[in-house]
């Protein structure tokens, strides 16, 4: 019986910051073109819990899958890292599914979009799931479950080669150009139709969703957030292997998302949509939100996965553990409907 190879973590500030910026581009691009907030758990929850099978949801998820497939093509020799045991993985998925559905969001919807709007509910949810994630990953030693080596990540900082940085810069610039191009085409269509919403706008709206999913998935690939071990290294703050990279992912995303959301105040409607669907800031911080944050954070801390990274990883390098986790998320989303708080 072969032993599991330990995973050594590296502090990767450039990967994190640039990958986070690409996540921010996807978030802002989706908002300005479609009017929708980028929330991956909510995108999944729609057809699973609410019976809302709108085409845009499948377009966005298809974009995430395409990002995973592209990564597999570019890195055909990639090896799946060790995952937590199947029972632990299933429990983690159930908690993430139930918690994200109860709290109406996850690391993308609340962590990036809600915090970019300075929404009190999102800030409260983020604090709760982060604190719970740190506690659970530490108490239940998720690093050990994922075979993370106890070597210092900070002392092993990695800076990408110049050609790699140039490649990422092209992805970032190309993503901005693609969103801008769709927006320009949509505005031309509006002028031809005297400002009326047309079927062409509906098509562009769906295309924009697919593009947003693709760009967001590319950001997850580059940032390292796709790796459960990387997430565990971040959440295990008391471990010698603590890796602060993911803090820079959030910072890179928010650096673009904050001004992006602020710019909406000067726009009557999105380029390809009828109206902006941004939640109001005045929502109540209630028990359901806080319990959802605890459950989501606990599941995230137990296995190191949240919905977006898991979908991209499943496309890039499918494993039984990922399939079990994703199935458990769906069950958790359905099951939380029967929990009364």
Image (tube, rainbow, N blue to C red):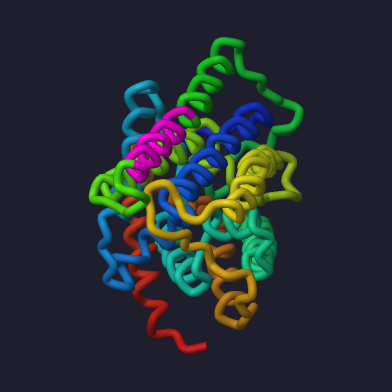
Which residue is at a point 25% across and 63% down the rendered structure image? 53
The one of 191 and 166 positioned closer to us in this rendering: 191
Camera-side residue of 330 and 304: 330
Q: Position of residue 263 (x, y in %)?
A: 61, 49
8 in relation to 198, above or below: above
Tell me if I can see residue 194 in this picture: yes
Residue farthest to the front, as pictured: 194
Foreground pick, 330 / 87: 330
Q: Estimate the x, y position of residue 155 in percent, counting from the top left.
A: 76, 27
43 lies above or below 103: above
In the image, taking residue 15 as reference, residue 48 lies left or right, namely left
Using residue 172 as the reference point, say whether residue 243 is left or right of it. Answer: right
Q: Which residues are magenta?
A: 177-191
Above or below, comparing residue 79 to residue 287 in the picture? above
Outermost residue to the bottom: 340
- Check if residue 319 falls in the magenta segment: no
Position of residue 57 in the picture relative to residue 157 (left or right): left
Residue 257 in picture, x, y percent from top left: 61, 46
User: Which residue is drawn at the image coordinates 42% and 62% (left, top)?
Assistant: 42
Q: What residue is rendered at 44% in x and 85% in y?
A: 339
Quarter placement of the N terminus:
top left
């Amino acid at each position: 019986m072969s032993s599991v190879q330990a995973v050594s973590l590296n502090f990767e500030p450039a990967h994190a910051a640039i990958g986070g910026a690409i996540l921010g581009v996807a978030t802002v691009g989706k908002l300005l073109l479609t009017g929708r907030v980028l929330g991956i758990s909510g995108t999944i929850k729609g057809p699973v819990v609410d019976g809302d099978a709108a085409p845009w949801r499948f377009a966005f998820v298809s974009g995430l899958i395409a990002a995973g497939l592209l990564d597999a093509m570019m890195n055909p020799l990639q090896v799946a890292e060790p995952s937590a045991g199947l029972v632990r993985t299933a429990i983690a998925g159930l908690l993430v599914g139930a918690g994200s559905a109860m709290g109406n969001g996850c690391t993308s919807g609340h962590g990036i979009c809600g915090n970019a709007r300075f929404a009190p509910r999102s800030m409260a949810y983020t604090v709760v799931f982060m604190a719970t994630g740190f506690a659970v990953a530490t108490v239940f030693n998720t690093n050990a479950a994922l075979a993370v080596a106890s070597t210092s990540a900070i002392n092993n900082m990695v800076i990408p080669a110049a050609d790699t940085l140039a490649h990422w810069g092209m992805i970032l610039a190309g993503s901005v150009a693609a969103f801008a191009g769709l927006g320009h085409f949509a505005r031309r269509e509006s002028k031809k139709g005297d400002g009326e919403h047309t079927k062409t706008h509906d098509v562009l709206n769906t295309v924009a969703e697919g593009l947003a999913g693709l760009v967001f998935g590319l950001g997850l690939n580059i940032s390292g957030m796709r790796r459960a071990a990387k997430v565990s290294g971040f959440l295990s703050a008391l471990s010698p292997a603590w890796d602060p990279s993911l803090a820079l992912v959030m910072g890179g995303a928010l650096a673009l998302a904050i001004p992006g959301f602020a710019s909406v105040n000067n726009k009557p409607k999105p380029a390809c949509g009828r109206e902006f669907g941004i939640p109001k800031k005045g929502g109540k911080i209630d028990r359901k939100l806080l319990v959802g944050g605890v459950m989501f954070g606990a599941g995230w801390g137990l296995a190191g996965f949240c919905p977006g990274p898991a979908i991209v990883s499943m496309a890039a390098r499918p494993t039984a553990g990922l399939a079990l986790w994703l199935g458990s998320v769906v069950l958790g989303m359905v099951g939380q409907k029967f929990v009364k708080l």
